[in-house]
Image (cartoon, grey):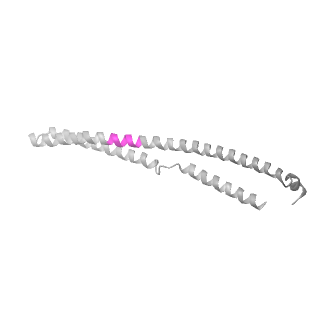
């Protein structure tokens, strides 16, 4: 050890506990702040994913509603075919096809929105926490060596 590092260390005995206590207190404050920051990051990430999931669910619901109207139009087409076998059924069939096409587009859009939210866990927060834990481990290893 060089003289500068010897001078920085307190004398052995009861005085040695004060710097350790201060280090522990400082570490606890830093860990508390780190946990708060990580929770804030997780909250923000989950909020963003929740918005995408909500949009996807709304599009799926819209697709279901349009499909109901498509089914009703198709039923009307079948009724008209059986009732008269005349051109009005063609119009009802065209409307049903258009409604089902719209339902398909909404379903695809909803699927895309929902897939953007998967997996439903705060990935960047978990990565950040892993990095923080590794940093603390490294610092602890270096502290033991000195």
Q: Is residue 57 left or right of residue 140?
A: left
Q: For this rendering, which residue is in front, 64 or 130?
A: 130
Q: From where the camera sits, is residue 32 visible?
A: yes
Q: For this rendering, which residue is in front, 142 or 109?
A: 142
The residue range painted magenta reads: 55-63
Measured as percent of width and height from the top left, residue 89 is found at 16, 40
Magenta span: predominant SS is helix
Give the residue displayed 13% in from the left and 41% down from the top.
79
Give the residue displayed 30% in from the left and 44% down from the top.
101
Measured as percent of width and height from the top left, residue 54 is found at 42, 41
Q: In the rendered image, which quarter contains the N terminus?
A: bottom right
Q: From where the camera sits, is residue 98 visible?
A: no
Magenta-drawn stretch contains 72: no
Q: Is residue 13 left or right of residue 46?
A: right
Q: For this rendering, which residue is in front, 97 or 41?
A: 41
Magenta-drawn stretch contains 56: yes
């Amino acid at each position: 050890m060089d003289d500068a590092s010897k001078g920085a260390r307190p004398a052995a005995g009861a005085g040695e506990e004060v710097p350790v206590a201060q280090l522990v207190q400082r570490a606890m404050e830093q860990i508390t702040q780190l946990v708060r920051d990580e929770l804030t990051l997780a909250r923000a990430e989950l909020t963003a994913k929740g918005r995408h999931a909500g949009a996807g669910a709304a599009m799926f619901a819209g697709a279901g509603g349009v499909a109901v109207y498509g089914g009703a139009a198709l039923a009307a087409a079948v009724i008209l075919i059986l009732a008269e076998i005349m051109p009005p059924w063609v119009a009802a069939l065209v409307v049903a096809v258009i409604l089902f096409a719209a339902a398909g587009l909404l379903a695809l859009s909803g699927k895309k929105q929902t897939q953007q939210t998967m997996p439903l866990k705060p990935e960047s927060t978990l990565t950040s926490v892993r990095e923080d834990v590794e940093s603390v481990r490294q610092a602890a290893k270096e502290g033991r060596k000195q």
